[in-house]
Amino acid sequence: MTKTVKVALPHRLSPAEARLRIDKGIADLRSHAAAKVAHVEERWTGDHMDFKLSVMSQSVTGRVDVTPDTVNLEVDLPWALAMLADKFMPQVQERGRKLLEKK
C-alpha cells in the first residue's frame, strides 16, 4: 500500500533553468543526505522526470513535471513513510521553494 503525496511549487524560471536547479538539488541530496537517502536514480524525458530512491530501507518512487510556471512533484510513499509524510513534506516544500527562487 502506498500513499501519493503531491506538491506544486510555483516558479518564475525558464523550464530549462528549473530542470538545472532540480538536478543540482538531487546532486546536493546525494552528497549531503547519503546516510539517510540511498540509490537515487532519475530519468528526464523532456520536462518530465521519473525518480526512485531508498529512504530508511524503504523504496520511494515519484515524478516531477516542469511547466512554465510550476514544478509539480508527486511522491509515492510506502505505508511506513506515509505515516511520517505530514512531518517531512513541509520541509520538502520549503527546500523546493528555495531551490526555485529567482536569483
Image: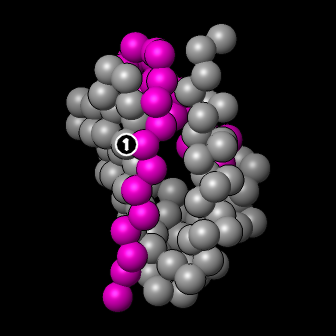
Query: Where are the magenta residues, as a range?
Result: 1-29
Q: Nearer the viewer, residue 36 or 11?
A: 11
Tell me if residue 90 comes above or below residue 80 in the rendering: above
Specify the quadrant of the image occupied by residue 19. Answer: top left
Disc 1 residue crowd, few under 14, some 14–19, many 20+, Cα 10 Å: some
Q: Is residue 71 rendered magenta in the image?
A: no
**Residue 47, image x and y in percent?**
28, 31
Q: Nearer the viewer, residue 62 or 69?
A: 69
**Residue 73, image x and y in percent?**
40, 48
Q: Nearer the viewer, residue 41 or 2?
A: 2
Q: Which residue is mark 1?
A: 72
Q: Which residue type does callout 1 highlight?
A: Asn
Mark 1, secondary structure of its residue: strand
Q: Residue at x 59, y 65 (%)?
A: 38
Q: Residue at x 30, y 28 (%)?
A: 67
**Residue 3, image x and y in percent?**
39, 76
Quarter of the picture containing the N terminus is: bottom left
Is 50 on the left-hand or right-hand side of 9?
Answer: left
Is 20 on the left-hand or right-hand side of 99?
Answer: left
Seen as rendered, the residue at the extreme left is: 45
Q: Is residue 17 rendered magenta in the image?
A: yes
Q: Nearer the viewer, residue 28 or 72?
A: 72
**Residue 22, image x and y in percent?**
51, 34
Is 9 on the left-hand or right-hand side of 63?
Answer: right
Answer whether residue 42 is visible to the viewer in this image: no
